[in-house]
Image (cartoon, rainbow, N blue to C red):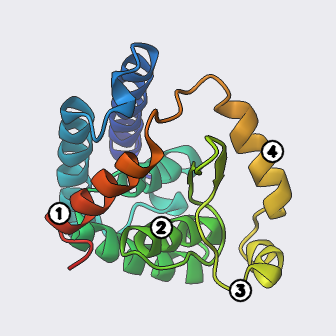
Amino acid sequence: MNADLAKRLIEMQNLDLSVRTRLAADKSLYDGYHPEMQAVHEKNAAALSEIIDKYGWPGVGMVGEKSSEAAWLIAQHAIGLPEFQRECLAHLKAAAEKGEVPKWQQAYMLDRILCFEGSEQLYGTQFDWDENGVLSPKPIEDEKNVDQRRADVGLPPLSEAIQRIRTENKHETKPQDWKQRQKQADQWAKKVGWRK
């Protein structure tokens, strides 16, 4: 186990989460992709990329469960770096096959990529505000079988996830203009290279 690397990953995750908490508290987090949050995500992604190049994916055997999950979170939050997230998905799939990370991590990454590309997700892990101002899963392919797919990767039924997400985020600010938010999200996805 690489204790120094494990500690570094936790520090990177803590920076991400502390900045997010501060920006959420003053409500500035919800107005597009906040430049400070983006800077943290990109700095962390660059550091994770160096770690991967040097050591491979930091799985449980290398850094322990908490630090390995921190690596996943850093990759999951690198939303403005499409190629990096796609590379991380390949690493997560390989690590999951070896039992070095739980399968749900690759499910979350795949869903995130599919949603940013404008496709339907497979596992129902990605949520956003709907037209009625309610946090709901983004569109899901073959939704009637989603709970089986979720079970296959160690996730609870979608109904439980919906309840948990809505409870955890009940104090978050819903968008004032849903259509404008969707338009801005589409423009951003094209600008950073998720879509053409």
Determine which of the numbered discs, if any, sits on residue 163 in the image.
4
Residue 146 percent location from the top left of the image = 76, 77
Residue 72 percent location from the top left of the image = 45, 56
Residues under labels 1 and 2: Cα distance?
17 Å
Residues under labels 1 and 3: Cα distance?
28 Å
Q: Amino acid at mark 4?
A: Gln
| Neighbourhood count class around disc 2 (C-alpha, 10 Å): few under 14, some 14–19, many 20 upward | many
Q: Amino acid at mark 3?
A: Asp
Sequence order check, earlier mark of 4 and 3:
3
How many numbered discs, if any? 4
Residues under labels 4 and 3: Cα distance?
21 Å
Pick the residue in front: 128 or 72. 128
Res. 155 image quadrant: bottom right
Indicate left or right for 10 with 39 as reference: right
Residue 22 percent location from the top left of the image = 39, 17
Residue shown at the point (28%, 65%) measured from the top left: 55
| Neighbourhood count class around disc 4 (C-alpha, 10 Å): few under 14, some 14–19, many 20 upward | few
Res. 100 image quadrant: bottom right
- Report the residue marked by disc 1: 192
Q: Amino acid at mark 2?
A: Met
Sequence order check, earlier mark of 4 and 2:
2
Dot 1 falls on a residue whose secondary structure is: helix
- Report the residue marked by disc 2: 109
- Report the residue marked by disc 3: 142
Tell whether label 3 touches label 1 (CB within 8 Å): no
